[in-house]
Image (cartoon, rainbow, N blue to C red):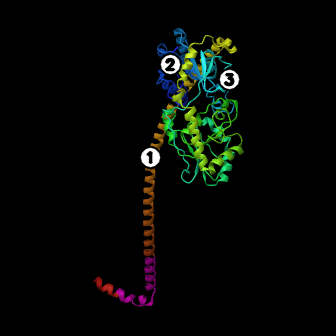
Amino acid sequence: MKIESAAVYTYERIVASLEAYRLFNPILRANMQINRGLVDGEFSTAPIKDSDVVVFQREFPANLSNYLAVMSQAANLGKPVVMDMDDDLLSLPIHHPDRVKLNYAKAQIPILIGMIQATALTVTTPYLADLLRQYNTNIFVLPNFLDDALWQFNAPQVEPVGDKIRIFYMGTVTHVPDLEMLKPSFRELAMKYPGRLEFVFYGANLNFEEDIPATITNCQSETFVYADYVKIALSQKANIAIAPLEGIPYNHCKSSIKFFEYTAMGLPGVYSRVTPYTSVVEEGVNGFTAATIDEWINELSQLIENPQLRESMALAAQETVRRDWLLSDHAHLWPETYAKIAELKAANQAPLAAYLPVLEDINIHLDTFFKKQEQITLQTNQALAANYEELSWHLQQTGQALAAKSEENRDLKAQVDSLAVQWLDHTKKIQALESENSIIREGWDATKLETVHYALSRSWRVTRPMRKFIKFFKGK
């Protein structure tokens, strides 16, 4: 059977890296038609009728009503259903940021049901296939490849960026624990090459509790749209790349994406010695792997000290990717794999499939519970919003009243200040009058004293008869 079209259902509205690597880019490069079942948030089962196969991604079943509609329509029309998985999301490590934040708590049961109910699973690696076979025996490996229609190959940047050797990491916040694991090696390298290194963490920021003699640059992710991310990645200037992963089963399920992307950027890399990288790294030729702090320090030191090694290793890695990992050479695997799935005769033989009816009922029960909780949360938020608006209104009214009182107080203060100035002027005038009165009183007292002295004097008494005689004649 020839597969020429696929109805594609994703959880995200944008084409982020997951959607680009696993579905959209390889299907388009294989010249298949994509009929999207979710466009700008609008869901429809109509694309299923015009498609040869139905494909959905890992979290899509978390929207139960949409998932059930897709499965029902596919069954009615006899279309094979493929579920794509790139991680073991049912086995998130207890310290993984997605588990800590409960990002998949609601989605895990729906994901399990989707894996059991799908006609077949497609996965990224043989390791992941072995783990997920317990849920579905019809499982096919479709590796990740570098889309050479988007990526170009930068020449290696041998010389330091500015005056420093720049060690570069690019990834999501879910990898902060992996970076934390390497802090001792970063400190040791900073002490070994004081002032010569810059550590750049793009997307997954790393903070140090103490100062180290190296430049630490944290950059926030600018976009999650994959085509834009590629442009940003290719514009980065650096000398050495790192890809740490904790050596746990969950990380062994991952693929070699960082090796492909760092290589296209022209960067030689040191990678954790886990399955994704041991399958592509030829030790000391196209990259280094490390498992201990000492190994990380040793391998990074070699690249720091040897610019020729940086260049030769980056070029060898580019040759590896060009030879084995270009999407243009492997996009045909998608329609070929879908054709094999469409021709399957046996249904899922995993023992867990026998419990599908019970799991479906549990899923419906949980979905009802979550919707009820969401409704309660919505009502609570609406009530809080209403209370907030009412409180804001009261605060506004109180503020206006206080402002009016404040204006009145300002007027009263102005009046008090004016009265105080008048009182001060009056006080000064009173003081001046009192001073003048004191001077007059002193003059008056002096005049009275002089008059008394004159009246009591001898000349006043001797001339008294003569004054009477003169007064007598004046009266005549």
Could you tell me residue 290's position as x and y percent? 68, 40
| Amino acid tagged 1 | Glu
Inspect this view and state whether residue 57 appears: yes
Q: Is residue 299 above or below residue 13?
A: below
| Amino acid tagged 3 | Asp
Query: Which residue lies at the image location 66% right of the left edge and 35% below the top edge?
Result: 278
Residue 408: which disc? 1
Disc 3 designates what residue? Answer: 130
Q: Quadrant of the C terminus?
A: bottom left
Disc 2 designates what residue? Answer: 6
Q: Residues within 10 Å of mark 3 (few under 14, many from 20)?
A: few
In this picture, residue 474 sits left or right of residue 248: left
Range of magenta residues: 442-468
Q: Nearer the viewer, residue 276 or 439?
A: 276
Q: Secondary structure at mark 2?
A: strand
Rendered image quadrant of residue 169: top right
Inspect this view and state whether residue 225 appears: no
Task: Say which of marks 1 and 2 sits in front.
Answer: 2
Residue 80: which disc? none
